[in-house]
Image (cartoon, grey):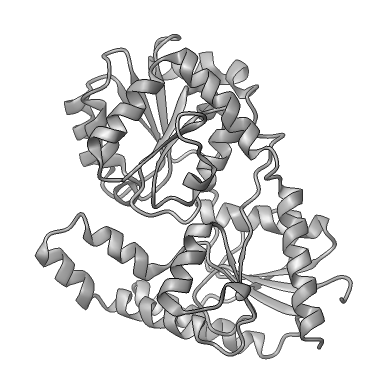
Amino acid sequence: MRTPIRLALIRQRYTAFGGAERFVARAVEALRDQGAELTVVTRRWDDQSGTPALVCNPFYVGSLWRDLGFARCVCERLRHQAFDLVQSHERIGCCDVYRAGDGVHREWLRQRRRTLGPVRRLAIALNPYHRYTLAAERALFGSPRLKAVICNSRMVRDEIMQDFGLPQSRLHVIYSGVDTAQFHPGLRGAHRQSVRAQYGIPPDAPLFLFVGSGFERKGVPALLSAMRAMPKAAHLLIVGRDKKLGSLQREGQKVAAGRVHFTGPQPDPKPFYGAADAFVLPTLYDPFPNVALEAMAAGLPVVTSHKSGAAELVKEGENGFVCDALDHERLVAAMRCLCATDAARRMGEAARRAVEPLTLDAMGEKLVALYGELLAASPL
């Protein structure tokens, strides 16, 4: 194996609020600590760590032109670069390793159709962007260059095997890492009082937390509906951004006036983990939400859905609960159980123990070990 490994990481965009992009930033740090030489291939890279970036930012109008133009630009630029391995976090065929951090687009559309009527289902089927993405996904998984796929959950691994027929030997489950020193139960003592005072939440009120952007996909409407059935003392904090923020805020006031609080996007979610008693993410589809890892590391029990990769870390009734994203009664029952603060605290301690092995160093070691195997099998 060459030392150090020269690795290119492809991710189209970076934002401090995006879970997938934050994973790339963490991966860069972890891999650099393992001695890899990294270059990020992106439209824009705001990271301040000094990691070199290969900027590929062609003009575009609309999401289809955006993704297609970026893919063509990247493949052309990489033809003139020397890397041991190219790892893509986008559905781009000119890569040796693909990290399926966004899951399987085909499966996401299946889950989304469950919530739509016939007209909107037809619109999805005819949508040019979805047609392009499905085609890019098929081309990627059929590429002869593709040596390995990094799956961030067993759920994603199984979906790829089922839909595209890749052998399990090429699918490697490597969970995301979490900074257990930054996200820890001590956040409760540091932030609980101040955050609650800021939003007018009583010190002893059961407080549920949601963190994420893309509210429809991640279950905010279901969560607001569940708040109707919560005890009058319970509050909900929603951290993130969405195009329909205004209408959801109005809905929150209808279902639980004064008890649903929208904070907007926050560059640092740690104070909110410290303020909460439980984390809720009834997502329609999420390959492996980093926010669930952070919440568990901060000592919060997690309620999530069967189509969330984080469900693989949840032991029912021990450190959280898992339900179907559309099972209103089950979601309500889980949240009502966590309104008992003693139960929430006990499950939160178990949640912390469950994620303690999933450190950034552990993730970096597994990634570098995989790269070494690939290079040994196909020496350059």
Q: Nearer the viewer, residue 291 or 319?
A: 319
Give residue 221's quadrant in the image. Answer: top left
Residue located 74% across and 51% down the image:
362
Q: Is residue 269 left or right of residue 48?
A: left
Residue located 56% across and 58% down the image:
152
Residue located 49% across and 75% down the image:
91
Residue that sits furthest to the right in the current view: 3
Q: Is residue 64 left or right of residue 253?
A: right
Residue 219 seen from this side: yes
- Tell me if residue 5 comes above or below residue 219 in the rendering: below
Residue located 43% across and 82% down the image:
138
Q: Nearer the viewer, residue 206 or 239?
A: 206
Q: Nearer the viewer, residue 142 or 34?
A: 142
- Tell me if residue 198 comes above or below residue 132 in the rendering: above
- Tell me if residue 250 comes above or below residue 44 in the rendering: above
Q: Nearer the viewer, residue 205 or 49?
A: 205
Q: Is residue 162 left or right of residue 363?
A: left
Instruction: Locate residue 43, reporting x and y percent.
Output: 55, 70
Give residue 303's quadrant in the image. Answer: top left
Q: How many marks?
A: 0
Residue 261 seen from this side: no
Instruction: Locate residue 320, reporting x and y percent.
Output: 46, 32
Instruction: Locate residue 23, reporting x and y percent.
Output: 60, 54
Q: Is residue 155 left or right of residue 99?
A: left
Image quarter where the C terminus lies is bottom right
Image quarter where the N terminus lies is bottom right
Instruction: Locate residue 371, reporting x and y percent.
Output: 75, 71
